[in-house]
Image (cartoon, rainbow, N blue to C red):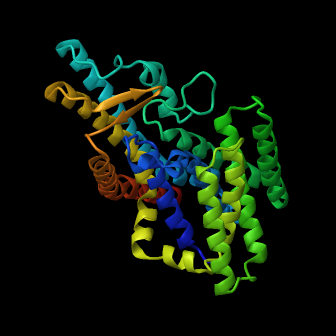
Amino acid sequence: MIKKRFEALDAFRGLCALSVVVFHMHWIESITELDFFSGALVFVEFFFVLSGFVLAHGYGFKRELDFKSFMKSRFFRLYPLHFAMFIFAFSFQCIKFFAYDYGGITFGSEPFSGNFAFSEIIPNLMLIQSWTPYTEHLSYNGPSWSISIEFYMYAILFMSILFFKSHKVISWLMISTISYILLFSGSDVLLNTVLRGLSCFFGGAVAYLVYTKISDLRPTYVLGSLVETILIVSVIFSVQSNIQNKGALCSILFILTVLFFAFESGIVSNALKNKPFQYLGMLSYSIYMVHGIILLYLGALFKVLEKVLNVKIRVMTDTVEYTTLGNAFINNIAVFTIVVLVVFISHFTYKYIEVKGQQLNGICSNKLKSEIVR
């Protein structure tokens, strides 16, 4: 019997989410400029791989699977937090509008322009912003671009189970393989965002099938520790490297990493089962979704402080806007403080938005059952 929860993989989700947080911060002479964190955006591929693995585990081989209940459960898992963060992003544009219109204060760009244009509202509310060439996938709450991709991956997964039945795994392998080929060839048949999701998500689903076939071949502690260490070193090296087709190559490595760490047989996976790592894993979705909004508001605060204190805090270099409070030590303290703030706020968004959303799903399901009984 395959276990229901993969604790080491949960911990990875939390660590990857924190790495993405640091990636999006640009502080002069700080850890944010280390090669590893500069390349950490590729961990979004890891999220796709892990989601495919976990969804294949939870739903891929169920005998009875109802599309409405399946999509409803996934909707209530993702959408409440997405919607809440959208409201904060929209509210920020309202603040910019009134500050610009009545106080002549600007925050670098006009309100409701660019990624925050009115035309991007409906695509964001429908979670389709990453699926069309006519929408901006990084609009409003930027990190939600991957949630846009992931939500509809669920529907594609369900259709593959429904239509291909005993051959569903072949369909997963075909979807992933073709998507990888298109990525490596630079094809524009589908958007890059879509190909990244398809290749990784269904690659993760195939990895789960492989795991079910070899789950009895659990490595020894020594062998498991050796392979886990090699995989971790490989991931670190790959993330901080600057190679062609980095995202696609790293995602293949992520598939292997997820597959092997599912066994939880070595020293690294045992360490990842400790409470701090499990706590981060629990908050990972909130950490990922909340941090963009926090950085958005902090950026505005720094611009206000620049004007009030008449000091330079934000520095534009090429296309990247850096932040500095004077020296490397203080900047690193600021980075650490912001990460702690993100985790702190994520604790409450998890408790009062994520959990409540899932409870709402349960309430809706119970009402539906009672109506059927009547």
Classify residue 115 as left or right of residue 210.
Answer: left
Q: Is residue 16 placed above or below 88 in the rendered structure?
A: below
Residue 154 spot, x, y in % from top left = 63, 49
Residue 122 spot, x, y in % from top left = 48, 26
The residue drawn where x is 83% and y is 61% is 166
Q: Quadrant of the N terminus?
A: bottom right
Seen from this angle, which residue lies furthest left?
Answer: 308
Look at the image and tell me whether residue 2 can be seen. no
For this rendering, which residue is in front, 185 or 190?
185
Residue 209, by quadrant, is bottom right
For this rendering, which residue is in front, 219 or 312?
312
The residue drawn where x is 66% and y is 78% is 226
For this rendering, which residue is in front, 102 or 83?
102
Classify residue 223 as left or right of residue 313.
Answer: right
The residue drawn where x is 53% and y is 63% is 12
The residue drawn where x is 66% and y is 65% is 257
Q: Is residue 84 placed above or below 256 in the rendered structure?
A: above
